[in-house]
Image (cartoon, rainbow, N blue to C red):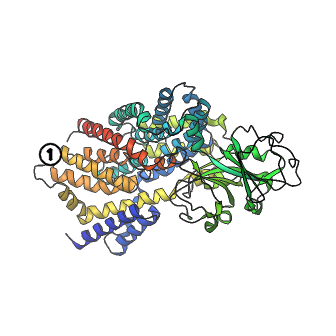
Amino acid sequence: MEPSALLTLFTILFTLVLLAATRISPDVVLMGALSVLVVSGVLAPADALAGFSNPGVMTIATLYVVAAGLKETGAIQWLAHRLLGQPKRLKQAQLRVLLPASGLSAFMNNTTVVAMFIPAIQEWAGRLRLPPSKLLLPLSYAAIIGGTCTLIGTSTNLVIDGLLQSEMGVGLGMFSLAWVGLPLVLVGGTFLYIFSDRLLPDRQGALEQLEMAREYAVEVIVDGKGPLVGRSIAEAGLRHLSHGYLADIERQGRLLTAVPPDTQLSAGDVLIFIGAPECARELRRIHGMRPAGGDVHKLDIEHHRRCLVEAVIGPDFVGLGQTVRESRFRSRYQAVILSISRHGKRLPGKLGNISLQVGDTLLLETAQDFVDQYRYRKDFLLVSGLNDSTPPDFRKAPLALGILAAMVVVSASGLLSILEAALLAGGGMLMTRCVPASKARRSVDLSVLVVISASFALGAAMRETGAASQIAQWLLLADDLSPWLALVLVYILTVAFTELITNNAAAVLMFPIAISVAEQLGVDFKPFVIAIMFAASASFMTPLGYQTNLMVLGPGGYRFTDYLRLGAPLSFVIGVTALGLIPLVWPF
């Protein structure tokens, strides 16, 4: 191989190692790889930066604004409450989750769909006494599979379509993938409907599992000048809270457990309550108690602007591995941690000494604008306001859904390209005030766009230096390898990349390899490219492979083995179905 090809392969391998084995942000890693290729002369600057002007990338950026309009108007929530209904049995509940999640994900970002469904399903499951652990992971999987049905269902499809347009001069229609996507939804949904109840945990029953999913320990102090001093627990109204219960009392250094209802309260008593986050909201309404955390009083936020927020720590959180005290959380985020839940279980001990990990769910006291400020940032996977949050303008939900429907119709009919339709839809969301310009601006995930755009440079380098052709030769070890077996190899390699790195980066890296495999076999490239689209979205075996999988980790109380137990057979079923259908729809 030429030195430039060797350098390209080394750069890609080093990039894969950094993405899979470190916590360095993917956009930093990919931009570093792009810089190496430019500085070394492998790529000209114009070629390296071509991804930033790719139609697929620009379409993704515009669709973020459309998704923001749907979120701000509560359109997804509006639909969810109408579609979830009131099932009486678990199987009915699973069906009502799988159908709307897969259907909505075909036309909007599946991360948005899952983020909106999680709190709705938690509340819904609690009311119906059903285990959310049986519902949230199927929600994530259904959203992933549903996104494969249309060109706009997942960013991976738009990225590959953009590569097809720029490199091969061909494009796909809005519903071109539906010939394979819809059968996958049917097969995958049926599998989840039959086996998720058997393969997913229900460790302590329906009601207990729900409590575990959002269980916190909230501490308050009896104010010495308040009206509760001298009253019993029952007289103070602390015996029958709706969302929690009094577990212990800490009095003058002694811990009183299993306290009877006639126990009298003393000034300075620390009351430890166990329950859902709404328990903290109930306690705030009881006069004579104040939060036990001293840092709450150090917040430079007016009292009437404070609220309670739940936040799930993401992989880019700056304080990973540090204790709460070391992370300087209060000064960094202007928020105080009241309690921490990990894998659905509350963490005992002093908060300041707890080390923070990815997936930890934090119960915070902070300002009302915290949700808006950090909803679209990578520090947290999910940020949800529990009190005094600005409610969605449900009056505009039908309007936002109408704009989305118009975008799908005009692009599917061929009147406009997907990019043009998305631009008009984004403009429509802004003009009708479905989303303010400030929130639309914050909704665009620049780190994702940078990752995708920089990945294009790696693909271009593989193609121009001949590295892609060399990898294709290594894949085709046997001279008489059939096109279908080559297709299987491309699919498996893409799935492996997707589980290790981001799905978009995996798709872009595999694109030139797939083209080279088709050229060396002398067959049409389309089935190989389509296989990459579906394989890059088939991330079911780890919580880290796809963002929606990580989002349900804490709220569902899952462990890593739960993903492998359900995700591995689902990945096999999806792979067999896709590899059987792709050559029929796009012959070699």
Q: Is residue 193 above or below residue 531?
A: above
Query: Residue 229, can we see it?
Result: yes
> On the rendered structure, is 267 left or right of 66?
right
Closer to the camera, 573 or 76?
573
Q: Position of residue 5 (x, y in %)?
A: 25, 68
Q: Residue at x 46, y 64 (%)?
A: 23
Q: Residue at x 65, y 63 (%)?
A: 352
Closer to the camera, 190 or 467?
190
Q: In the rendered image, which residue does mark 1 sit on?
A: 482
Q: Residue at x 30, y 54 (%)?
A: 511
Q: Residue at x 15, y 50 (%)?
A: 521
Query: Residue 75, can we see it?
Result: no
Q: Position of residue 146 (x, y in %)?
A: 42, 38
User: The C terminus lies in which quarter of the figure?
Assistant: top left
Closer to the camera, 250 or 219?
250
Q: Position of residue 536 (x, y in %)?
A: 35, 49
User: The N terminus lies in which quarter of the figure?
Assistant: bottom left
Q: Position of residue 574 (x, y in %)?
A: 33, 39
**Mark 1 residue type:** Ser
User: For residue 403, what is the image quadrant?
Assistant: top right
